[in-house]
Image (cartoon, rainbow, N blue to C red):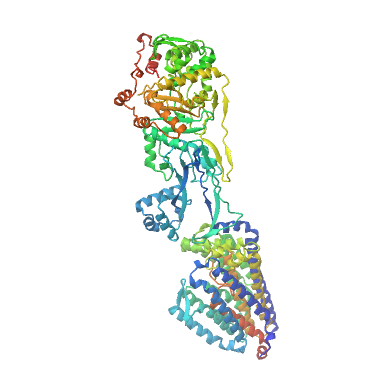
Amino acid sequence: MSINRKQQIRISFRVLQTVMVLGWLILLGRLVQLQIIDYDKYAPISQQNSVRQEYINPSRGLIYDRNGTIMVENEPIYSISITPASFDMSRIGLLARLLQVDRQQLVERIHQAQEYSWHRSSRLFTEVSFQVFSNIQENLWRLPGIHHQIESKRHYPLPLRASHTFGYLREATMEEYEQSESIRLGDRIGKSGIEMIYEEYLRGEPGIGYSRVNALGQTLGQFVDHDLTVSPVQGSDIITNMDADLQILAEQIMNGKKGSLVAMDPGTGEILSIVSSPQFDVERLAGRLDLSYWVELNQNRDDPLYNRAISSRQPPGSTFKPFMGLIGLHLGLITPETEIYNPGAYYRGRAYGDLADPGNYNLERALTRSSNTYFFHMMDRIASSGLLNEWSRLAKDFGMGERNYIDLPFESAGIMPDSTYMNNTFGENQWGVGDLMSLGVGQGMVSVSPLQMAVATSAIANGGYRVQPHIVRAIRDIDGNVSYTEPNRTRIDWLQEVDLETVQKGMRGVVTDGSGRWYANLQDIEVAGKTGTAQNPHGENHGWFIAYAPYDDPRIAVAVLIENGGFGSISAAPVASLLIEQHLTGTISRTHVLNYVLDFTYDDEEEEVESVDTVPEENSVSIPVVPEPEQLTPDDEMLNETDPNENF
Amino acid sequence: MNSFREIDWPLLLIWGALSSFGLVAIYSATQGPVSHFLPDYIQQNFFRQTIWVAVSLIIIALIQFIPPRTFQGLAYPFYLLTVLMMIITVFFGVEVSGSQSWLRIGALNLQTAEIMKLATILAAANYLTSQRNVSAQNFRTAFTTLLFFIVPVGLLLMQNEAGIAVIFLALLPFMLFWAGLPHAITLFMISPAIIAYLSIISLAWGITASLLIGLTIFLLQKRSILAIASVVIGLLCVAGTEILLHQVLQPHQASRIEAFVNPDLDPRGSGWNIIQATTAIGSGGISGKGFLEGTQTQLRFLPEQWTDFIFCVIGEEFGFIGASLILLFFLFLFLRLLHLGYQHQHPFAQLFMVAVASVFFIHFVINIGSSTAVMPVIGLPLPFISYGGSAFLTNSILIGICLNLDLYKRSLSIYH
């Protein structure tokens, strides 16, 4: 071997050595880059890759009545969802077969999902049967992009709905999702009732779980890492003040009627029962959105979604009289002994009718007989001496014409007119005494909700306390810690015990001797109450009844409004008395009254006669008073149509 | 026969170390906690590989009893026999995942391409060193040598085995270089590959590389015609690559080649393997996720993780520590073989050992380069680590012959 060749070999050896070491160094450098420098980039990718994060929905808190009976619970539903981008459209036939749906319908659903997002999962079908769910589960490996979940929906085990009170759930909107940290897209949240007000307690906190999947998307089991896994926190249970038995009865009674009622504990403001009728079936809104039902609800002229118990605004009619009396006593317009003569009508520019027998009336008798004159007289003096604003303020102290902050959404304030209101309505100084007179008997501009009347009635029953009405008594978290709601309870400071006693006696008289005696006078329970009829220019008048019992130690106060029910004494009073009987005795002994109430209809002309006939005593039938024609002004004309022919 | 103490134990040990590491990785890739999702025949890979390791060890031992001249003497007949086997494979071979490169002999499926590797090295080394003068300086000799490579490459392309064909094409310049081909010519030979590679990454790099290589060739050879030819061919390569990627190939084919530059362009398609592979390696970090704990591996995010992507298994489960250890073993393997060859007095033995070192180096660069997204994915096994009986056996025989040639280096030299 030549020296030349030897040297050449040495050079070649060095060159090859260098090439190999250089090549090796490049790969080592790449390894350093991937594993040391970029580790933070790749570690999370591999984590997401192999471990699929999934939210575990917490079970929503249950809703109980005051005795521990479950009124709202959860039941599982099965749903199938799709991520359109991963779905293989050639599998559509298989999927349709497994889902047992029409191919065309499935194609439409998938198109909808695609419109929402190609990369996010959308629910394809919810509430599928367990059989379909299992079929999908078994064939999941053939259906990329298809997922299955077990979710839950609300279930109402008792024959009561309390739809307006419980409220329904609906998927959170984009705005709600953006505003809240804890709401995920697609989450269903309370949209009305206590589901809405107590959403944050009921919802709980979603857990985060991980399952291992392989590259084919097959789930290989749970991935347990205690640092990462977050157990879901079950939503807190809500314990309401409601009495399930009372609610069942109340809903049964109100079924087929238009109106609402509120029964509460006058001492505390605890709502025992609250019904708005017609109501919707909250169970039908619990699961998959039943579009036809939803449209039907929204198109119904009686607006079943509207919570009449707290949102309706109707004149209180004669049920306002006890409060009018208390205001008059406080303002010094009358004393409990003051007697006013009723000649059959009150004259102030025109005749304001009074159907009570002519004669002298003190406050107690005026309440018992529901004489209008006594109250027109007081209102006349209030209006004439510029006390309207004072009157309005005092009336609002009872909770009428302002919000009471019940724990339900969409509570209306109602109207208790003052000078500002009158100016806004009629124009500056364009109104006078004549526009205010009817306020004295709860007609005209004044409007209240049954809830407000129940709160006001409670004030009379409990010795002058304004209570805050509340549905929920306590919230019990998953650990069993119970926190009680703390409703307000304040003494209405201007109310005098003596004055209250007079009014209470008057209301007791309504039930024993007055318009309440037919249906509201219970044998073993002393009931006090007041009937009322709200003028309705658009149809049959609305019947009111407010009551509380037992007289000496009130445990229930009730306000009932039967729309188009005519006189309160025959429409609302029996309803209220049944609620009182049920709550205080636990049963209904007067089945004839119950049957009467269940059959009660007062919607059109023919039945009007019929129901008037059912009134046991003939002198209770009212005779409309024709106002004197020469007194009419344009404003009066409007008032006239709504003017009292009111006696009960 | 020489004493066994004279066997190059470091080389044998490195063979043992790599084989063991390979078994661990194959075990993890096919016997992991959720391996029941794998097909049965893949689950058996670990056991088959264990048998292959044992058989290979015996064969390495047996090779030590063969007179060293035999290799030279049988080089041509063996080459012809293997070419014949490959022709048979083309027509009667068993098709495995798209490649008709397996010959069924009894219960064995032999990958003839692997045996061809051995045969070609033997034949080319024999041819180049049997010439009277230092051979490759003579261009006719160089072209004849090319024929030894062209035949298997052609047959491999007919078998749809472009990956292994790359090995042959890459090995040729290494052998010619050692055999005395001028450096400038060698550079000229390999320049198209370098330029094409850089052109895929970026047009500017490709052009820069053409010019630099032209300049280097001019400095080495002082022949302006060759330098200019090199630049022209280099630029044609750049243009060719561009046209190929953007005009000739369908977008999905082009993206398969380009994917290593930017895998995110097609993360579900051609970028998938690259993303999963780099993720596996990158997420291993310094110390790795632990044996059988690699999520990418165990959950089958890696394709062909027991063969072409086995390095990802090591990178993920044993981290930088394990992966760089493998790298070190390989570096030691090349340098040891290179060193043994350099020390050897016999030209055939020299060239054979250098060729073996080169083959392992090419396998190493392509396999780990593919796994770490330094280059387009070319499906080639990692010697001694990847599952595959034929490859393991062939590679072991290469080591065995090197050991033999080293063991008999004095007796060989006498005859020279």
Q: State whether residue B395 is above or below residue A260.
A: below
- The quadrant in which residue A99 appears is bottom left
**A44 vs B368, nearest the viewer:** A44
Q: Is residue B366 visible?
A: no
Q: Residue at x 47, y 49 (%)?
A: A151
Q: A565 left or right of A507?
A: left
Q: B219 left or right of B202?
A: right
Residue sticking out furthest to the left: A606
**B155 vs A607, nearest the viewer:** A607
Percent from the top left, x then y, of residue A117?
46, 49
Percent from the top left, x then y, of residue B386?
57, 72
The mark total stands at 0
Percent from the top left, x then y, of residue B239?
52, 63
Q: Is residue A635 visible?
A: yes
Q: State whether residue A101 is above or below residue A216.
A: above
Q: Quadrant of the N terminus of chain B?
A: bottom right
Percent from the top left, x then y, of residue B316?
60, 64
Residue sticking out furthest to the front: A524
**A35 vs B87, nearest the viewer:** A35
**A344 vs B175, nearest the viewer:** A344
- The quadrant in which residue A16 appears is bottom right
